Image (cartoon, rainbow, N blue to C red):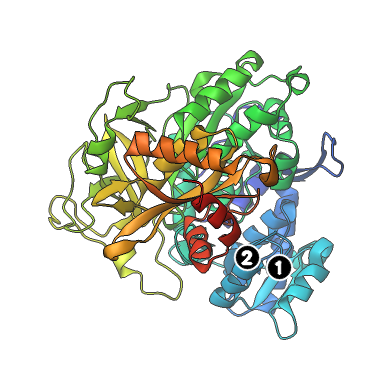
Amino acid sequence: MDSRRPPLAPACPTLPEYVRHWAETLPDRRAFTFVEHPAPHSRGIHRTLTWHRLDVRVRALAARLTDETDPGDRVALLCPQGTEYVTAFLATLTAGLVAVPLYTPGLPGHADRLAGVLADARASVVVTTSRVREEVRDFLGAGGPRIVVADEVPDAEGLDRQPVTLDPSAPAYLQYTSGSTRAPAGVEITHGNVVANARQALAAYGLDSRPMSSVGWLPLYHDMGLVLSVAAPVARGALSVLMDPAAFLHEPVRWLRLLAAHPNAVSAAPNFAYDYCVATVTADQKEGLRLDKVTALINGSEPVRPGTADRFHAAFADQGLAPGTHCPSYGLAEATVFVCAARPGEPLTRFTLDRDALAAGKALPARPDDPRAVLLTGCGTPAGQHVRIADPLTREALSEGEVGEIWVQGPNVGRGYWGRDSQEVFGAEFADVTAAPGHWLRTGDLGTVLEGQLVVTGRLKDLIIVDGRNHYPQDVEATVQEAHEAVRRDRLAAFAVPGGAGGECAVVVAEHARTARLAELDVPAVVRAVRGGVSARHGLRLADVVLVPPGTVPRTSSGKVSRALTRARYLEGAYGGQARAAGAAE
């Protein structure tokens, strides 16, 4: 284990300069380890790059890319999860080109998105590996971008090549948004943005001065996976241990074993992953598992549910997991990724709020025993950036306890959307510029500040407005999945559709649990339970409840449920059979 005293990190302006620094000062220390699981119950095969070896591979591939491109070209990364992905990303930046972190064509259900992003980015070169070269070539077809196979580029190509002088304000990569509420857009992240955000995240989680190991299974094309598993370890000179997302999904205990094996581990996962571990990790698998050295478990990417943190820590308390390791966080691709976080070692901050007041834009306390209350989690405070709450219509700054749009300002905010007019999103100004000067990022997320902490309440575009009342879809979804055991957790979408008299009505599309078969379920009973629960708790009548098989509700490339795509499919009649059965079950 690399548990020695952490090295002093210099203030390098770009990630490639950090790589060169660590290669010179700590050449033999481990930089990146990819743990491969070739068999169902494999404990893992470790493949490691030291800082020296990483530098050699980055230089070689950067030289090849320089020969294949013109300055400013986009380079699409279609590599499997692994050290070649890391090398390809850092090599593209080293060559002064613009990386486009993507995934292989074999990712189920995302071929259309991949084709769309490739067309939007207009990449001149695609980097892949020999293992998936034919798959990539078949996908690109004749006349597509040139292909560079990362693991076939010899080390010698990097010899005697002088590094390119990089401008920190120049684009380093395009981070395409997940597409949970709209078509994916490429955020221009500069070299300065990603270094600033890596430092902000390190400071927020207290990792800028203590030993750390990053342990992650989040895909590297995802903003959190890229920053936490690549950018932050590079800026810190720390070890990053990677595994494939599929390996986690097949056997979640693999992630926990890696956390146990690497002291001072920090990792991130969306809310569903913690519940998934609770449901699937067996008592036998817990034997000998020690999690007392885990520093921080970041919970982000979707609404952070307090009950999830409670269940996870209860399930693994006997393994030594400290309650203060759970760190609710908030971020988005437009801000590179990190915005706010609760600090490790602090108890989870919970707010019990009046549902009706919240829908009206006020965060007012409610009694803990009120069945209609909303329980939300604080996402901590920002580090190295500013966060304000604004009225989305008047652009007035709001006070603590008032709900509005979250606006962000800092060196981590991207330059804008690639090839699109971005002024409205990235160049917002408050009505009173003297109180909050400068340009701000409009996140499209709703939230408030309570006791100094950011509390995220939902997405502005996702709001369900029925009879003049606001309903947060994730709040409705939480009620639905608790209403009946047949509803699969975190695999459902609530949204609004056109209703009578020019208004809107609410619909829920939910997957049933994998343990049940749709043909054997008492669908009318499930629908009655869902309708009753939502009516009692939200005062909302659901116009339709659709129960569908597992895997039917579409998800984004980062694993979040896509409400926008679910809504579009519903309106297209894609759930017709199930919808008619559900709709008749009132």
Amino acid under disc 2: Thr
Amino acid under disc 1: Val
Tell me the SS state at disc 1: strand
Lateral position of residue 17 relative to residue 342, left or right:
right
| Residue appearing at x 67%, y 75% in the figure | 125
Mark 2 Cα shell of 10 Å, populated few (<14), some (14-19), many (≥20): many
| Residue appearing at x 58%, y 29% in the figure | 211
Mark 2 lies on residue: 92
| Residue appearing at x 51%, y 23% in the figure | 310
Mark 1 lies on residue: 127
Relative depth, front residue between 310 and 146: 310
Residue 463 location (% of width, % of height): 34, 52
| Residue appearing at x 25%, y 52% in the figure | 467
Label 2 and label 1: CA atoms lie apart by 9 Å
Number of on-image labels: 2
Foreground mark, 2 or 1? 1
Residue 98 location (% of width, % of height): 56, 68
In the image, residue 290 above or below residue 471: above
| Residue 113 visible in the shown view | yes
Q: Which quadrant holds the N terminus? A: top right
Tell me the SS state at disc 2: helix
Q: Earlier in the sequence, mark 2 or mark 1?
A: 2
Mark 1 Cα shell of 10 Å, populated few (<14), some (14-19), many (≥20): many
Lateral position of residue 440 relative to residue 475, left or right:
left
Lateral position of residue 360 relative to residue 26, left or right:
left
Q: Are marks 2 and 1 in contact (CB under 8 Å)?
A: yes
Q: Residue furthest top?
A: 318
